[in-house]
Image: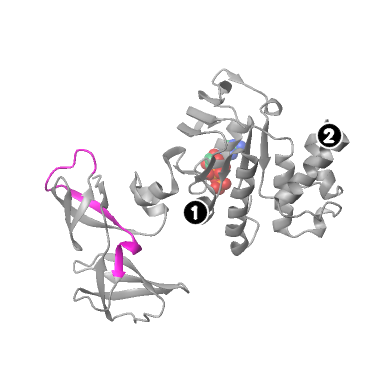
């Protein structure tokens, strides 16, 4: 168990910069997740921490010990890091117990057995020790891979899309389970995923990467409610950006009226801005006089997601309980439930 800190990491493949000045910090036992579009550098970042990809600048440290700088790279086998990948990579000819024992063979048989029993209980599979991997489901195999990585009590655990081979419903419940397991082991962990529900279920901190940069490293709540970048506003959760005009230092004028706002640094009265509107900012209310036309609707089981047309033609999203079965083309009453709008400068 250790703090993990990355300071201004850079890394390149054949001279092409792939990680650009990345800094992040996890305290002992904290869980981080990296989100971002394909090719943005998430796996490369994990590989740099594991020692499988050199860094050209910056430093990677565990608590007070630097394990990588531009002129020093501790070999992977001495970094004391556990890894879990997408494809389980269990040894097919070994039983579950033998698989988990793989990284702790130096311990006495008694201690090995104690640790294996402890981990099998922790992952909720106390009775599968004598089975072979092919006798387990995908989700069970992934839990065994996790137990194997945790067995030697590494300083940190890196997980690269561990659930991506599993079906969608299993993924979110496994993410909660994984969080409980990691917290029980008090291990510092960093996971890459494409799935933000998974990231939100699992992580204390989530980082959003784009083009090799970490745009924001923050709590899930702040990423959703205080995105630092229009890309994050768009990428995390649902929402649209509508146009606005700065009225004074606290308000913007939009087609949804005058909104209290967190204005970007340096914004002046009269500046054109982009205003983030989430589906939960606009509530459907049959009693409201304020009506907007439904131009699209998506049934989500527990709710409808309506796309509404604003007077100037812009669109906004509105969430409504699923018994409000309004048709496309009809007008529905709305009310705003927005504390402070998030506003971004328009870069021309
Ligand atoms: N071994 C390599 N040699 C050259 N370029 C590479 C190599 N591995 C990755 N890249 C490039 O580095 C960039 C980052 O790749 P990386 O695999 O880290 O992205 P990622 O965010 O993990 O993507 P994905 O979500 O698709 O797994 C991509 O442009 C990729 O093409």
**Nearest to N terminus: mark 1 or mark 2:** 2
Task: Provide residue 224's location: percent of width, then percent of height.
Answer: 39, 52
What residue does disc 1 label? Answer: 196
Mark 1 surroundings within 10 Å by alpha-carbon count, few (fewer than 14), some (14 through 19), many (20 or more): some
Residue 172, horizontal then vertical, whole percent: 57, 58
The residue carrying pointer 2 sits among few (fewer than 14), some (14 to 19) or many (20 or more) residues within 10 Å by Cα, namely few
> Which numbered tag is attached to residue 94?
none
Q: Report whether residue 168 is seen.
A: yes
Q: Which residues are magenta?
A: 264-283
Q: Is residue 88 visible?
A: no
Give the residue at x 78% y 40%: 115
Q: Residue 275 lies in magenta, yes or no?
A: yes
Up the image or down, 129 lies above or below 104; here it is below
Q: Quadrant of the C terminus?
A: top left
Whether residue 142 is situated above or below residue 113 in the rendered picture:
below
Report if the beta carbon of the residue with label 1 is closer than 8 angstroms to ligand 1.
no
Work out which residue is located at the far top of the displayed protein and give it: 71
SS label for mark 2: loop
Residue 124 in the image: state x and y as whole percent. 72, 54
Inter-mark Cα distance, 1 to 2: 37 Å
Q: Is residue 53 magenta?
A: no
**Picture quarter with the N terminus:** top right
Residue assigned mark 2: 105
**Left or right relative to 95: residue 62:** left
Which image quarter has ligand 1?
A: top right
Q: Position of residue 97 (x, y in %)?
A: 83, 46
Decide if residue 25 is on the left or right side of residue 123. Answer: left
For the residue pair 232 and 302, the one nearer the viewer reads as 302
Seen at 42% across and 53% down, the residue is 236
Q: Secondary structure at mark 1?
A: helix
């Amino acid at each position: 168990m250790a703090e993990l800190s990355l300071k201004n990491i850079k890394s390149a493949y054949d001279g092409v910069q792939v990680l650009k000045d990345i800094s992040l910090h996890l305290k002992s036992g904290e869980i981080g997740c990296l989100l971002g579009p394909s090719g943005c550098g998430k796996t490369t970042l994990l590989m740099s921490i594991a020692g499988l990809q050199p860094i050209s600048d910056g430093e990677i440290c565990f608590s007070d010990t630097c394990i990588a700088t531009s002129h020093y790279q501790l070999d992977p086998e001495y970094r004391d890091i556990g890894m879990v990948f997408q494809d389980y990579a269990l040894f097919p000819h070994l039983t579950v117990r033998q698989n988990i024992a793989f990284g702790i063979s130096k311990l006495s048989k008694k201690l090995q057995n104690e640790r294996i029993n402890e981990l099998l209980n922790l992952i909720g599979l106390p009775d599968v020790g004598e089975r072979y991997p092919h006798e387990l489901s995908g989700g069970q195999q992934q839990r065994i891979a996790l137990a194997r990585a945790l067995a030697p009590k590494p300083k940190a655990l890196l997980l690269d899309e561990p659930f991506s081979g599993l079906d969608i419903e299993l993924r979110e419940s496994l993410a909660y389970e994984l969080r409980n397991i990691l917290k029980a082991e008090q291990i510092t962990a960093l996971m890459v995923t494409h799935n933000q529900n998974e990231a939100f279920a699992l992580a204390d901190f989530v980082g959003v990467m784009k083009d090799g940069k970490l745009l924001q490293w923050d709590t899930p709540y702040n990423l959703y409610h205080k995105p630092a970048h229009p890309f994050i506003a768009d990428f995390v959760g649902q929402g649209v950006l509508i146009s606005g005009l700065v009225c004074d230092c606290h308000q913007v004028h939009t087609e949804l009226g005058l909104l209290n706002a967190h204005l970007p640094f340096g914004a002046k009265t009269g500046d054109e801005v982009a205003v983030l509107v989430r589906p939960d900012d606009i509530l459907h209310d049959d009693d409201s006089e304020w009506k907007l036309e439904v131009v699209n609707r998506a049934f989500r089981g527990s709710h409808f997601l309506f796309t509404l047309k604003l007077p100037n033609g812009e669109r906004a999203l509105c969430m409504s309980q699923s018994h409000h079965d309004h048709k496309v083309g009809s007008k529905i009453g709305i009310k705003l439930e927005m504390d402070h709008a998030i506003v971004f400068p328009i870069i021309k």
